[in-house]
Amino acid sequence: MNFLVIGRTLEGEFILKTMGSSSCGLPTTHDCLLTMLINASQTVADSPCVICQKSKAAIEAEMDEIAAEFGSAVRSRSDLDRSFTAKVEARLRSAAECGLRGDLFGEGVNVNPVRIGRYDVVSTLGRGGMGVVYRVRDRESHQEYALKTLPDMVRSGSQTKARFQREISSVRRLNHPAMVQYVDSEMTEESSYLVMPIIQGIDVGSLVSNGKSLMLAEVSEIVRQAAIGLHAAHEQMIIHRDVKPSNLMLTLSPDGRVQVKILDFGVAISRGLDCDSTLTEEGQTLGTLDYMSPEQLSNSHHVDCSTDIYSLGATAFRLLSGVTPFQQAGRSPLKLMMAIRDSSVPEIQSLCPALPLSIAGFLNRMLDREPSYRPRNMMEVAVAFESYAAGHQLGDRLQERLLAGTDDTAPTLE
């Protein structure tokens, strides 16, 4: 069964995507063609599509059905920008009438590989600038996993390959309930991949989309568990450098309790003996601006655990207030960087006056411009939030989303 999914990113950009696969595990027309239509001007030649094996005429007929589905989905949603949806529907109908322009077999078309190492590719879970994540099946054990690989190993630069090697090393070293566990990996000149379990859960960022916020108890439990996990990483001399809501996922542990998982160590840095300073050149900035500390903005390489403390504080600020610490600076990256560099984060009480003074003051410390004024380590953060986590309803939220079939799949890409 296929679903047309319409949503909006935290940055306010609309997403249009499809979900579903054929009985044989190959992507359906919705997957392989609608994505091409929206993301690029790729098209279908007269010969059958190499992904779904359908003719151009059959594809165009199905595109007509997709347009109708899209219109129905739009009419059932009251919070969508009508001008946007009208434009997308027009593009879909145009595709149905005229066919897609271009050549499906041309350069730049994303066709899933059939096999990677000993793993058969089932479907694509996520695709981004830092890599591709596939759902794969181990031909020996028949178990399904998430396999992350570079989008183009041959063309990837040396720094990209080195960062991916560092991510593999970080995941392999971090054996903790808050981390996605290592299964397998390969790193050669021709092929690089990292295999991890497929985890069902809720992306914390999706809980606070469109300016929503969470109760103090829920935020406290998320921050407490994330802090414990990050403390384990810091003990291994690994700094995450991209802590934010969308890199935290709520999952169910084997005993039925809510477990926070920390995702995406793609820009993590090791402060140990294997640290390679050439991977982050002087002046290069890595991370996400909305949650980035002043020192990380200045130089992403010369940071320690306090930058993750700041980012976790910025995450708590967003979850409690519904806005990021410097949202008043607007969406201009330059203005946002200037605010991070020159201004202090507004005190959380100005947006959440009912917040207890003790935890509000602690959160303000986490977001201090001066690293030495912040809490000493992540365990101090976990202890500070622990008493406020009592009575949280995260389990109910997670069960509701899982039963509704609106859960996410980790690992994810941005």
Image (cartoon, rainbow, N blue to C red):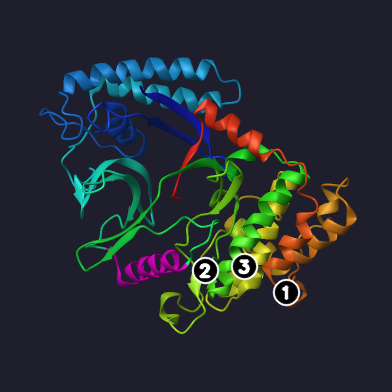
The secondary structure making up most of the magenta span is helix
Tell me the crowding category of disc 2: few under 14, some 14 to 19, or many 20 or more residues within 10 angstroms, Cα based: some
Task: Answer whether labels 3 and 2 touch (C-beta < 8 Å).
Answer: no
**For mark 2, what is the residue?**
285
Residue 1 position within the rendered picture, expressed as x and y whole percent measured from the top left? 35, 22
Verify whether residue 369 appears in magenta: no
Badge 1: residue crowd in 10 Å (few <14, some 14–19, many ≥20): some
What amino acid is labelled 3 in the image? His
Say the numbered circle drawn on residue 231.
Answer: 3
Secondary structure, mark 3, is helix
State the CA–CA distance, disc 3 to disc 1.
11 Å
Relative to 178, say whether 21 is above or below. Answer: above
User: Residue drawn 22% across and 49% down?
Assistant: 140
Which mark identifies residue 102? none
Q: Name the amino acid, label 2.
A: Thr
How much space separates mark 2 and mark 1, taking CA atoms?
A: 24 Å
Bounds of the magenta segment? 156-173
Specify the quadrant of the image occupied by residue 204.
top right
- Indicate the quadrant where residue 69 lies: top left
**Residue 376 bears which disc, if any?**
1
Q: Can residue 154 be seen in this view?
A: yes
Residue 414 as seen in the image, left or right of residue 122: right
Is disc 3 surrounded by few (<14), some (14 to 19) or many (20+) residues within 10 Å? Answer: many
Label 1: element kind: loop
The residue at 15%/23% (across/down) is 55
Which callout, 3 or 1, points at the residue further toward the start of the chain?
Answer: 3
Q: Do the residues labelled 3 and 1 touch (CB within 8 Å)?
A: no
